Image (cartoon, rainbow, N blue to C red):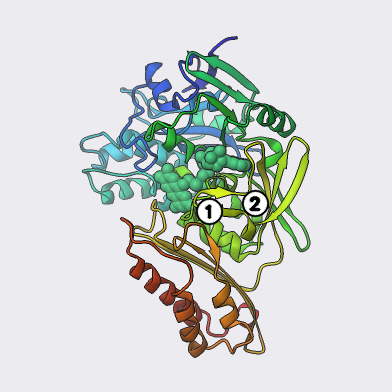
Amino acid sequence: MSNQIRFRVNGRDEAFDLPDPRTSLLNCLRALGWTGVREACGEGECGACTVLVATPDAAGAARWTAVDSCLVPAAELAGQEILTSQGLGTPTALHPVQAALASGGGSQCGYCTSGFVTALAAEYYRPGRPAGAFDDEALDGTLCRCTGYRPIRDAAHALPTPAADDAWALRLAEPVPARPAVDVTTPGGRFVRPATLVEALAFLRAHPEATVLAGGTDVGVGIGLLHQPAELILDIAGLPELSGVTLGADVVEIGAGVPLADLPARLQGRLPLIDELVPLFASTQIRNRATLGGNLGTASPIGDGPPVLLALGADLVLADASGERRVALSDYFTGYRTSVRRPDELIVRIVVGPAGPVHAFHKIAKRRHDDISSVAVAYDLVVADGVVERVRIGLGGVAATPLRAHATEEALTGRPWTAETAHAASRVLAGEGTPLDDHRASAAYRRAMLATSLVRFQRDNPAAEEGN
Ligand SMILES: Cc1cc2nc3c(=O)[nH]c(=O)nc-3n(C[C@H](O)[C@H](O)[C@H](O)COP(=O)(O)OP(=O)(O)OC[C@H]3O[C@@H](n4cnc5c(N)ncnc54)[C@H](O)[C@@H]3O)c2cc1C
């Protein structure tokens, strides 16, 4: 069996003999000579290793998507098309993004520049972007270590639209290559990407020890930084059965493998809580890969998805090779990073019923972007005739598992939706869970943040009826 993978890099067909299924795209590209891709943090925090991948949007049209190449196993990109800063320009003919950065003083030591160039280029090529319009969020996953952000931002806001003969813009008129099934056995282990969910579940039944890989934004950190073993990787990213979003009359179903960045467009405003969650989740590069399936798969107590999905009263659909079962998310977590999911099961989709008209997601973290929550609180509220008819509150960061704030929900239900009610219930909320002291926050701080959150939620939504 061959250990060779093939893809297209900067318009050139490349073949690479994979030494290990864990080999990152970053290390693979550098081994192939594309050394403009830089390694810095190695954990998706700084964006120096950002490359662009041609991916389909909701309508199937191609776009250039920024991803952290340090987190993605190279085999995951087999058959796909990648663009790096070296492909964008040449030493004699700078790409407009490179020219803008150079002339605007947006690069000093140059270490992060390659990542800024690719992150800027993703926004430069965003279909429909008007000249001079630049979404600053496109830079939320790229860390500058010496230049300072003002000249970089100035360069970004001065970008023209791509010229009519721009090769990489023209490339977007072509379809994205289909993702081939992959099965490579390397000296260090095996990487398998089945073509269908049925094949994936059969493989998992035979190999429950396999490391399941979706976006890889957790798995990649585990492999790269924590040296976790992963000799057998089952890649489920892009499986069609996990990539759908269904908007029913009352119920919304979200495929476990939909990248977070795509959710707002795919949900068409049906779940505003998720629209609030997405921009606060990590960074552009991470959101372009991370999935809700992976967020729930880790069963982390500080994931941002669970509080939101708990507030939405979500159920999960788990599947194994014999069929499906449905589990309320509130029954899914069993302890610190454990869940009812068996090793031969996958989360296939998340099912959400009608959402209330009033909602909020409060993420308390040290930075607005690219940071993990110290405490996260999500609310879904229905008020009728000035009285709380139904409220669901999801919490993260205050116990070994994400949890519903049942005592607080009880303290609010049937009471007038007033500042007094919120103040009284905030004392109950401060007592929910068993927060710990750790490097992110003290237990006392977490309790104080819980109480403040509810008071703020009421203050922000004083006349909450029908979402007013
Ligand atoms: C820089 C950085 C910032 C981050 N910021 C945040 C943040 O702000 N908020 C936050 O919540 N998280 C954050 N994360 C963590 C991570 O991005 C999320 O947990 C993400 O949702 C994981 O999704 P993924 O598809 O990349 O999962 P993967 O890494 O592919 O998988 C994660 C785990 O879930 C399992 N898994 C994946 N899909 C399934 C499935 N369908 N069924 C069963 N098991 C599955 C995998 O086996 C693995 O154990 C951050 C990570 C990084 C590197």
Work out whether residue 282 can be spotted: no
Vertical order, 121 against 334 (above or below)? above
Image location of residue 340, percent across then percent down: 63, 49
Vertical order, 465 against 160 (above or below)? below
At mark 2, the secondary structure is: helix
Residue at screen point 58% across, 30% down:
209
Amino acid at dot 1: Gly
Between circles 1 and 2, the one closer to the viewer is 1
Residue at screen point 45% across, 35% down:
220
Does the Cβ of the disc 2 residue fall within 8 Å of ligand 1? no
Q: Badge 2 local density, few (<14 within 10 Å), some, or many (20+)?
A: some
Image location of residue 402, percent across then percent down: 52, 59
Q: Badge 1 local density, few (<14 within 10 Å), some, or many (20+)?
A: some
Vertical order, 76 against 125 (above or below)? above
| Residue 176: quarter of image | top right
Amino acid at dot 2: Arg
Residue 245 in the figure: left or right of residue 136 = right
Q: Nearer the viewer, residue 404 or 143?
A: 404
Work out whether residue 381 can be spotted: yes
Q: Nearer the viewer, residue 372 or 209?
A: 209
Image location of residue 68, percent across then percent down: 43, 36
Q: Which of 447 and 386 is in front in this view?
A: 447
Image location of residue 135, percent across then percent down: 44, 52
**Residue bearing the label numbered 2:** 266
Q: Which of marks 1 and 2 is nearer the N terminus?
A: 2
Q: How far is disc 1 from disc 2 in space, using C-alphas?
A: 32 Å
Of the 4 image quadrants, the one containing the C terminus is: bottom right
Q: Residue 335 carries which label?
A: 1
Vertical order, 395 against 89 (above or below)? below
Of the 4 image quadrants, the one containing the N terminus is: top right
Residue 167 in the figure: left or right of residue 332 = left
